[in-house]
Structures are given as structure tokens and as C-alpha cells.
Amino acid sequence: MKINNSHHFFLLAGFGTISCLTNPTDGFSSSVSAGASSSRVRPAWTSERRRRVGTTTRTATALRDSAENDPIDNTQRLETLAKIANEALSSHGTEIFKPFHARVAVIPPSNDDDDDDYDVPRQFRRLGLIASEPVSKADQTIAAIPFYDSDGSGLALAPHLATKVVYKDVLPEGYDGWTGDIGLLAMLLLNEMARLHVDAATGDASPKGVSDLPRRKPPVQSLMNAYVAALPSHREMSELHPLLWNEEEQEILQSSSTKKIYRLLDDVDDDAAWLEETLWNADRRTFPETVSLRIRSPDGTDDDDDDDWIEERPCFSPEGFRYAVALVRSRSFFVDGSLRLLPFLDFANHGDFDSYEISGGGIGTLWGSAKGAFLKSGKALNVGEEVEISYGPKGPAEYLLDHGFVPGMCRHSRRGGSAITAELTFEVDDGDRFRDDKLDVLEYETYDLAPMDPSQSFDVVGGVGSTGAPDPAMIQFLRLVKLGGRDAFLLESIFRKEVWGFMSEPVSEENERDVVMGVIDACEKALEDMEGEDASDGNLSQNAKLCAMVRESERQALERTLIYMKQESEALDLKEYYQERRLKSLGLDSEWSREDDDVGWGGTRVPGGADYDW
């Protein structure tokens, strides 16, 4: 789901002032509080990161409560935001898009009444893209956007722009938060919101954040302002995205999936706490806790209050950072080797069938070719039909944690889903006497793979056509994790360059039994930890029903894997292990008999057979 807004001005609050660009048809502005600057050096983490084992202690902010007083209902809001986005595209789209054959539109709720195909986001009106021109065939480009990675002067946002451009003089060198690239994109998004701040009392522009970066031409900045205004509000994201659900719903999701939401929340909170303490509190004039955005319809007038309102959003605060992370998780794409926000392309909603993922490639420009992203149609479309894309091959929990919904292909239902997965995590034990040797193998000797962490997560698969067979990479990793006893000789330095390859096949019956039992125990533990009502329970809330969908899908994946591994445990004696393979490679795998005294010395020369007279 998505929502819209627009306006453009930049002012560097706390860093100096630069030109302010305005467009009366844009309809948008921003406001803030003050603070003092201080040194910006991130200390090393010295304490162990906390991990929840019980309920979360989060509290909703006043922003969430005050959102109930939004001046217009959701339908009118979406229609206004669509107008703002389309006005910006009509006026300035050719400045950046190559091409953009679509329009932003309000997509009505799904008419599918089948409870087995329940999709919470489709129960609401939301923004999406519709074709503005006929699409005659599949694989036809609907929109393309160049990256402008060097300076961020385009619309596309990439993580390196946070550390090398926008926050270059603010963040310490080598900054690396727990939220990684998602957190950096969230900081860029917060800065774009702050640039649009208005004085809530007067409605006058009062840009905050690092308001002169990235530097863009006025038409491009106008597009960015319209995009930021059209993003879902904090209130909407609180209803739709798990990172902003209430405590009770988050706890239900925690016990419904092998992908734990508390881990994500801890990462977000840890980064927000450091940023607030070290950066934001030190300069509240630049980094306000909330910003006010003025949203005005392009066809409205200064006297038309219905099409002109001030919207308050959390910004440089823990709540604002969580809000921005939720937006980034729901809207970002991995293209051309980097996670990216692709404004306007990301209005396209997901479709299970006849849809493509957004892809990278070269885009022809006036000055030659530039790298960029393409949105292509998966089928022929008439004018006005919705343009859908694929959000990628993810499991049910990933879709819910990223996008706030569970598509049909990820659901365990009577029709079956094709992307039903659960997650199992394994690690090298801290008490393993061979831990250092195993970490050395994972770091340096995994061949062409990147160095591997001692803790690894793997998907197990259920759904249509699944046998429950685990990922070979998971079994390979587990064989190394369980290596010990009489097999530990393989960790000697003489085998160091080959040991990872050895793990791709059974090592010994004892090691293989430990691997199989490790998977069985992990599946049983995950199934035991899953709690909650059936998705068919009519008394469940919308979010609780989503959790139930995830739970039932993951249960199927875990149960299929469990059945497969139990069968494997009964066939361990039928496998060929390392010693047998080694003997066979040396030609020593056959039994010796006295009748076979030809040991390969040749037809005329045998030991003691020389006719010498000493």
C-alpha cells in the first residue's frame, strides 16, 4: 500500500541556508525544534545486544492516537495524493523517467470473498499504477528510472548516498548499524520528509534535516516532494505493517513464525537509540522529532480546506525511525547489486501471476547510457488496467514482515501455495573444541562464496510439489558444525583447502546422524513454539488472521521437512561416506583374496623374480 504528497524547498537547518524552490501546484511543506551540535563519533559497542524472550515493552506514541483526527477520510486522502503524484509526473516526469507509461490511481478493494484467499491489504483502498497507454505484449517496459549513483541528483535512493553524500559530515566514517542498508535508506527517507517541513501554525516552508542534499534540479526535486507526500502516513503504516503493530499483535507474530519479529525490532531500536543519543538530540534544530507536511491538491485553492491540510509525521526519533524502516522494507528493491528505493515505480502492487520483478540495465540518455531500473509488464494491458509486478520469491513471513500481507502463493490452503517456507537457524557452538578451526574454514575456505558467519539461517520448503528435502547448503553447513570425534582429522591443516568441499557429501554415519537429528530437533522445537488460533476462526482480527496464515504455512513446511529427515534417519546405513569414497578413489575398495596374487606388477617383472646370479 502507498500514499502521496508533494512540494519542494530546501534549506539547510543548522548547516546554513540555500535556495528554496517552490511550486504552487505541489502542495507541501515542513517544521521542527532546536538543539545544539556536538561531536559525532560513534563509540564501539561494548555491551551485549539485548534480545527479547518475553513480551515487548513498546508504547504507542501520541502520534498514533492523534492520527484518529485526520481531516479527511482515507478514500478522499488517496484521491488527493494520486492527483499530486500525477500532476508532478505530468509536469516533470520526462526530466527523469525514460519512459513512464502509467498513472498513479486509487485501487479498489479486492472482490474476492474466498476466506481461503484472505488478503488484508486488499481489504482497503490503496494507491497503485494503471497503464496510461495500451501494452501490446508481455515484457514491455512501462517505466525506467536512472540511478545517478554518484551524487543522488536523481530520484533513486541507495544506501551509499547516506554515508557519502547526505550524512557525510554527520555520521562517523565506517558507520554500520544493525539495520544495515535498510537503516541507511530509512535515514535518507527521513531527511526527505524533513526537507518538506512547514511551520504548523502558518503553513510556511521551514525545511529541516540536511536540507541541501542531495542537490537536485527543481523539476526532479518537485517529483521527490510529490513522492514523499504520497507515502503512507504513520497511522496507515501502524495498521498495515508489523513493525508498527501494537504489542499484543507483535507478540502473536513472534510465536507464529520462525522469522522472529523481535530480532528486527531490536535491530531498529538499537540503531535508533544510538542515533538519538549521539546525533539527533545534539542538534534538534536540524533533526526534529516530528515534522509537519502541508498537503494541497493541485486543483484546490488556498480557500479550499478540504484539499489542503497539515499532516504531522514522526521523524528523527525512535518512532520515526521505525516508521521509516517499515516504509523502506515495504518499498525497496534489490537492483544492480544494491538495495534501492525507486520512487513512483514502487507504487506498483504485487501480483502472483503474469508479473516480473523490477530489473536493472542500461538506460539510453541524452549523454549516452546510464544504469537504471526497469518496470516491465508481465502481460498485455489496456489503458486503465492495473500494472502489477512481483515482489520476489519470498516466504509468507518475509512477505508479512516486509510488505504487511501474505500473497496467495505463500498460503497453506486447500489449493496449496507454491512459496511456503519456514526458517531454521544453526550455528557453531561457542563450546565446540574445534570452533576456531571451523570459523577459519567458514571465513577463508568456502571457495568462491563470501565469508560465512558462524550462525546461518536456511529456508525449508513446503507447498505444492515439495518433498521436504532440505537445502543442500544447510546440510553442508551442518556437517561442518557437527564435525568432531574420529572425523576431526579432516580439520587438520593438510585438509584445510578441501574440507568445505568434503562437507558437500556424507562424512561418516555418526556425523550424518548428528546432522539429521539436528534438523529434526530444530523442526520439532519450532513446531512446539508456534501458538495461536486457526486462520478460519471468524473471531480473529485482521492482523491475527495474517499471523495464523503464516503459522499454518510454516507448519506445513516444517512438517514436510520433519517427515523427510525422519526417513533419512532410517537410511543412514545406505549412504556412502568419506572413507569409502577415499578408498574407492585409490582403488582400494575391493576385498583381497589369496587366489588373486596379481597385484599389478606387470606380466614379466614381479618381486623376487629377477634371474640374477649373485
Image: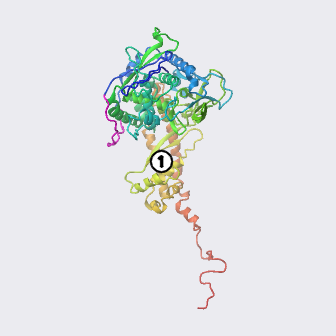
Q: Which residue is mark 1?
A: 519
Viewer-proximal residue among 118 and 121: 121
The amino acid beneath tag 1 is Val
Q: Is residue 119 left or right of residue 183?
A: right
Q: Is residue 137 left or right of residue 544?
A: right
Residue 108 in sight in this render: no
The answer to whether 276 is drawn above or below residue 72 in the figure is: below
Viewer-proximal residue among 551 and 444: 444
The answer to whether 38 is drawn above or below residue 239 in the figure is: below
The magenta span reads 36-56
Task: Give the residue at x 53% y 43%.
Answer: 560
Viewer-proximal residue among 515 and 452: 452
Residue 137, image x and y in percent? 68, 29
Residue 293 in sight in this render: yes
Assign a secondary structure to mark 1. Answer: helix
Q: Quadrant of the C terminus?
A: bottom right
